[in-house]
Image (tube, rainbow, N blue to C red):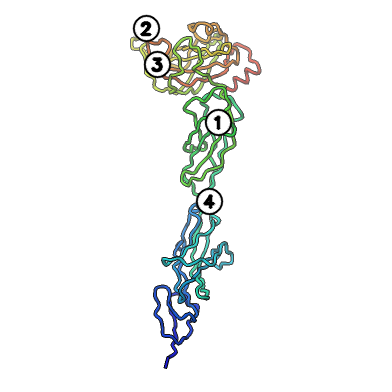
Amino acid sequence: MSLRHCVIAVFLGAIVSVAACSKSNPVAPTSTTAAVDPSLTASVTTPRPISPANGAAIPNLSQPVTLTVLNAIVTQPGGTTYSFEVATDSGFTAKVQTKDGVAEAAGGQTSLKLDALAPAKDYVWHARATAGGTVGVWGVTYKFTVGPAITVNAPVLIAPLNAVATNARPTLRATNAVRTGPVGPIVYRFEMSTSSAFATILATATVSEGINETGFTPTTDLPIGVTVFWRVTATDSTSGIGSPASTTQSFVTSLAIDLTKVVYLLGPNLSSWRETGKITSIEQDGNAATGGLMCIAFTDPGWPGALWIYGGDDPTFKIYGNQWYFANINGTWYAGAGEWLYRGAAICKAGQGTRTIGPDSGFGNPFASWVPKQGELVGYAATASARALPQMATVQERTDVVLKPWFDSSLALTAQSVLQFKKR
């Protein structure tokens, strides 16, 4: 006579239903499922959360978050699915994402990739299994935190603005970008173009952030006499998150001279000389009664000295450079090497009166007879020894060429010349 046997499944975790009695012999369970009579009601344990670990902090950039559980143990093999809930409160009344019917995966674990969650928030999650018509209970609740979002605002341009006149290598300046979140080092990309749509790029550079503002000076001359549009973008170099491009501004390279088209009356053609120095200030007064001073200050690149060849008390005396002057006469730029420079001397040289820009009229015509007008743009530069070439030759290096309005305190200033002079 056959005996009625009762099979009771006991598992780790919560047991949702108790197995019914059957006339069949007991069947031993294997791995996570037990082969039993199909007439039995399935027993389902709770899935155990694996990741994110309880209390995990997840950077916002690491989204989407993937929830992973250890598969539940069930007594009815096949067809097991999982439900996941994510909420912002432990009671799961403020659910932000739910997902049912996630098919059990092989390998003992099942995962769900969430949609993007709001940053800078705490979240809790749990899961349950369903198998053989039995819906399990929710498992242990785990918590994780999504970190704050990273945002980088567009830099604000400082200068040059509003189509202002500049030289061929203006310094572009922008305020540092406002940012939020755990950003790394910020870098700035400067772009220049002759098109407001930036269809073609004249020059570009990526530079590290400065203090309060960041700047860039082109290392080669921009086209002369053209309108150049420019903009800046800031990027977090760690996350790769970038700002929108700044507003677009423009400048006109009208305060520049094409050195390849200059007529050199005294001294060499400077167009191929390397620019190694930078003029920092120019102070000039063509009033002969006050000495006609010409003061050109510049960063000293360390040009070597050359022995003076014109005699003197000190046979070791050396000069290392010359002041240069440029004049636009009837639409043509002329240039000449003027006063000598020697170390230890002041940057100011005397003799540049209005009637002759050079102290000895050695440039020849039309430069020697040229009379600059009050407020007229005149070019200035400094070079290594250049006036007595090939004697006293050292290196072929120069500063930038700067245009400034001519000033003579002995002459009346017109309203326009006063305006130009103030813009120096």
**Mark 2 surroundings: few (<14), some (14-19) or many (≥20) residues within 10 A:** few
The residue singled out by tag 1 in the image is 193
Amino acid type, label 2 = Gly
Query: How many numbered dots are placed on residues in this image?
Result: 4
The residue singled out by tag 3 in the image is 320
**Residue contact between numbered discs 4 and 1, judged by CB atoms under 8 Å:** no
Q: Which mark is residue 173?
A: none
Compute the Cα span from label 4 to label 2. Answer: 73 Å
> Which is nearer the eye, 270 or 2?
2
Residue at far left of view: 315
Compute the Cα span from label 1 to label 2. Answer: 53 Å
Residue appearing at x 45%, y 71% in the figure: 72
The residue singled out by tag 2 in the image is 312
Image coordinates for residue 392, horizontal then vertical, percent = 37, 12
Sequence-wise, which precedes: disc 4 or disc 2?
4
Q: Which mark is residue 149?
A: 4
Tell which tag, 2 or 3, sits nearer the viewer.
3
Residue 295 makes an appearance in the image: no
Amino acid type, label 3 = Tyr
Image coordinates for residue 181, horizontal then vertical, percent = 52, 49
Which quadrant: the N terminus? bottom left
Compute the Cα span from label 3 to label 4. Answer: 57 Å
Compute the Cα span from label 3 to label 1. Answer: 38 Å
Residue 59 makes an appearance in the image: yes
Name the image quarter holding residue 75.
bottom left
Q: In the rendered view, does 184 fall on the left or right side of 158?
A: left
